[in-house]
Image: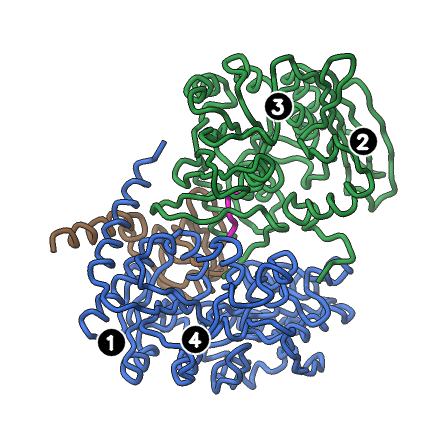
Chain colours: A blue, B brown, C green
């Protein structure tokens, strides 16, 4: 019944888990920042295997979850304009705005297209010269270089019907805001593997140096996550606080300089609002002056209207790691993946969705 | 927030584009962020862009590498 | 946010489809037979148990590697009958054709249906044709209905799973949905995956010849493996645990799932079945399946337990556990 590989993986997992159990002394609260880690942890079943004393809490690394309702509403408003094609990643289709969602708008006749790559939006603009293609870009540093490269490509091809509505954010400022806020005790971070492919190790230095908290840049396979947890447990046991790379096969200390170059060429850091965390200085990306023609907010005169979070919704606190999904009064009752109230439930990697879909109570 | 899949560069196309193989299925990928990637290289792909070159051995033999780690733990 | 319009998710075969059926159709058409929500309705007539089923086929593109809308329409209905252990007696086929549809293509579809019907050993005995204006029907829609007889001694129901039973799948999952996805070209992924579309009544007859104690059969079409197992767990009031490592899947299907962020347990299959049967019957039935062309890669993938009632658990590659919920709505590709 079992394939060879399964047995091998289980054996390695057991060895890693044994070592974690052996080295663990005091209870540890480990925050995994990245939404993709949240899902990977649940899907791998690691929660059902970790020893007592290790608490995994999810952080704000879910780009869909931290996008404020007002920004979703603004993008949805665009879909009501004539001649506009809105291109976006699948992750955003079900996010509830105040009155509607992209999926609802598509059913009503809005031209909304799911893309896998920002280059597809550029191609769309080339193929449909009479229409205006707006790419609604949500993501972190993993995705921003690709978006920057696509902006440059659109420029190169002279596509004046290509626009960008940017909701991009940066991870290190969010981690700093969390640590400075002091609302949740964090003994160690599992740092986002793919963001780190781009930014490398250096930007996380402050976590160890200023706050004395260890961080391990971790991959997404089950064994990666187990090794990452082991490295954190080992650091705590030995009284160290360093930034380490577990995801050695993909993350270089210097990250990807070429990717950062393109990012810096096209975007500039700006203050940004995060659901749950409030406004964090220099935590978002906006198009530089040279590319301002592509700024959808200006080209379409889209005002940003601040919207309250739905009453009872605890997404903000869940994103900070202060509350867990079962603590929310709406969880599993009024708020489920089919009828989500907040983004933590609708996002494919939202903490609440992960708890609901994979984890039951743990 | 980031699905990154390893794939093998099969051929180069016009501009910065390349054909990459993912376990038997293929898709076009941009090498704009990884211009040094060559045919035969393994790359990590996110939203249609190669974001890093991977060592072939590490891309293919991840489990073997983990087994070595596990072995070293047992020796301690 | 309750939708006030039909969404694509209502057709995905998961929770939203169920809700639509419960709240709109069951409410109105209230009757015991319908409420059972089996793949086919079971009616009794003059002492015989008659299975009756219907399905519509709206697949795009119409032709894909491994099949087409015609083959799908015959196999889908034959399989719904086969999941109750019924031998197909006859099928009907209704065609809604778009004005302008090439007659050559229609000939291809019809030839394909004849081939599939021959494989299944059943005749297409009634039909209808309608033509609608250009712009509607996207070329062609087919609706097939089927009637079959459940032989004496065969009792296969959704509520038949018992703790201690084993769960068998007849082959690799996900082929059909991925084949159609690749053929649509939406995501510019190139690959050679063929739909597994096939009539399963022959395989089921082989299995029943070996053992009459098969408790449940389902073909994991829309909603995939996870959804049908959840339906069985709910209907039978048992828990089902399956092992990630044991579930057969092609490398290419895995590759596409990784590229799109899809979960393979929710992909549609059109030539596979899941069987739940007592442990002692499993080795013989498995052998019979493996000697049939449609069951060569059949494998035991899990077992039925008392708890957790009504739920499905997946034992992961590293030995942990996670819940497998039924599909909610259509799967959307994700980058995160």
Contact between labelled residues 4 and 2, with CB atoms less than 8 Å apart: no
Query: Visible in this render: residue C306?
Result: yes
Q: Residue at x 56, y 54 (%)?
A: C333
Q: Is residue C264 magenta?
A: yes
- Which of the 4 quarters of the picture holds residue C126? top right
The chain ID associated with circle 1 is: A
Residue C95 got which mark? 2
- Write down the residue under mark 3: C199
On screen, residue C276 versus residue B45, left or right, reads right
Q: Nearer the viewer, mark 1 or mark 2?
A: 1
Q: Are marks 3 and 1 on the same chain?
A: no
Indicate which disc, 4 or 1, sits on the residue closer to the N terminus.
4
Query: Visible in this render: residue A94?
Result: no
Q: Is residue C270 above or below residue C286?
A: below
Inter-mark Cα distance, 3 to 1 = 61 Å
Contact between labelled residues 1 and 3, with CB atoms less than 8 Å apart: no
Q: Residue at x 59, y 51 (%)?
A: C331
Q: What is the span of residues highlighted in magenta in the rendered image?
A: C261-265
The one of A236 and C107 positioned closer to us in this rendering: A236
Report helix, strand or loop for mark 2.
strand
């Amino acid at each position: 019944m079992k394939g060879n590989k399964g047995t091998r993986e289980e054996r390695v997992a057991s060895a890693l888990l044994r070592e974690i159990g052996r080295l663990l002394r005091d209870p540890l609260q480990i925050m995994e920042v990245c939404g993709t880690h949240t899902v990977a942890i649940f899907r791998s079943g690691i929660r059902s295997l970790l020893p007592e004393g290790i608490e995994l809490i999810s952080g704000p690394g879910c780009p869909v979850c931290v996008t404020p309702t007002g920004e979703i509403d603004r993008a949805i408003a665009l879909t009501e304009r004539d001649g506009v094609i809105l291109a976006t990643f699948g992750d955003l289709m079900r996010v509830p705005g105040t009155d509607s969602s992209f999926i609802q708008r598509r059913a009503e006749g809005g031209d909304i297209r799911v893309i896998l790559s920002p280059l597809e939006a550029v191609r769309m603009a080339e193929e449909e010269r009479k229409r205006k293609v707006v790419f609604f870009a949500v993501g972190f540093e993993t995705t921003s270089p690709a978006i920057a490269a696509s902006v440059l490509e659109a420029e190169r091809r002279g596509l004046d019907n290509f626009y960008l509505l940017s909701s991009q954010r940066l991870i290190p400022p969010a981690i700093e805001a969390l640590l400075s806020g002091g609302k949740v005790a964090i003994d160690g971070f599992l740092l986002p593997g793919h963001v780190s492919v781009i930014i490398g190790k250096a930007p996380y230095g402050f976590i160890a140096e200023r706050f004395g908290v260890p961080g391990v840049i971790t991959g997404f396979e089950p064994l990666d996550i187990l090794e990452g947890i082991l490295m954190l447990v080992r650091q705590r046991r030995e009284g160290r606080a360093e930034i380490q790379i577990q995801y050695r096969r993909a993350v270089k200390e210097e990250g990807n300089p070429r990717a950062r170059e393109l990012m810096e060429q096209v975007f500039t850091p700006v203050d940004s609002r995060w659901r749950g965390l409030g406004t964090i200085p220099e935590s978002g990306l906006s198009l530089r002056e040279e590319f301002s023609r592509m700024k959808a907010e200006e080209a379409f005169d889209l005002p940003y209207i601040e919207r309250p979070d739905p009453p009872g919704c605890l997404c903000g606190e869940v994103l900070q790691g202060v509350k867990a999904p079962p603590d929310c009064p709406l969880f599993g009752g009024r708020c489920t993946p089919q009828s989500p109230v907040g983004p933590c439930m609708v996002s494919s990697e939202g903490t609440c969705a992960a708890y609901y879909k994979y984890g039951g109570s743990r | 927030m980031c699905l990154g899949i390893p794939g093998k560069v099969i051929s180069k196309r016009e501009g910065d584009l390349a054909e990459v193989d993912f376990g038997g299925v293929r898709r076009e990928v941009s090498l704009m962020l990884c211009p040094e990637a060559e045919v035969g290289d393994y790359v990590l792909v996110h939203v249609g862009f190669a974001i890093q070159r991977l060592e072939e051995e590490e891309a293919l033999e991840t489990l073997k590498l983990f087994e070595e780690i596990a072995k070293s733990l047992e020796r301690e | 946010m309750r939708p006030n319009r039909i969404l694509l998710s209502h057709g995905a075969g998961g929770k939203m489809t169920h809700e639509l059926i419960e709240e709109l159709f069951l409410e109105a058409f209230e009757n015991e037979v319908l409420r059972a929500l089996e793949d086919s309705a079971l009616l009794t007539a003059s002492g015989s148990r008659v299975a009756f089923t219907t399905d519509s086929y709206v697949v795009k593109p119409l032709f894909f590697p491994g099949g087409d809308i015609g083959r799908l329409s015959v196999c889908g209905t034959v399989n719904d009958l086969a999941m109750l252990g019924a031998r197909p007696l006859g099928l009907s086929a209704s065609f809604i054709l778009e004005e302008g549809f090439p007659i050559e293509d229609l000939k291809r579809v019809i030839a394909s249906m004849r081939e599939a019907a021959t494989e299944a050993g059943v005749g297409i005995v009634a039909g209808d044709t309608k033509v609608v204006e250009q712009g509607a029907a996207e070329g062609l829609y087919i609706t097939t209905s089927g009637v079959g007889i459940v032989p004496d001694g065969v009792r296969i129901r959704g509520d038949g799973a018992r703790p201690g039973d084993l769960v068998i799948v007849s082959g690799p999952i996900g082929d059909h949905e991925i084949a159609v996805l690749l053929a649509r070209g939406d995501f510019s992924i190139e690959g050679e995956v063929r739909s597994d579309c096939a009539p399963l009544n022959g395989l089921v007859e082989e299995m029943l010849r070996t053992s009459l104690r098969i408790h449940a059969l389902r073909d994991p079409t829309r909603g995939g493996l996870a959804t049908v197992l959840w339906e069985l767990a709910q209907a039978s009031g048992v828990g089902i645990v399956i092992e990630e490592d044991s579930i057969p899947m092609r490398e290419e299907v895995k590759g596409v799932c990784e590229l799109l962020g899809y979960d393979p347990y929710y992909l549609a299959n059109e030539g596979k079945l899941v069987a739940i049967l007592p442990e002692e019957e499993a080795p013989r039935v498995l052998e019979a399946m493996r000697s049939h062309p449609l069951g060569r890669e059949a494998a035991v993938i899990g077992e039925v337990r008392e708890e957790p009632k009504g739920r499905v658990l997946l034992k992961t590659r590293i030995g942990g556990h996670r819940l497998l919920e039924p599909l909610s709505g259509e799967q959307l590709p994700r980058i995160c």
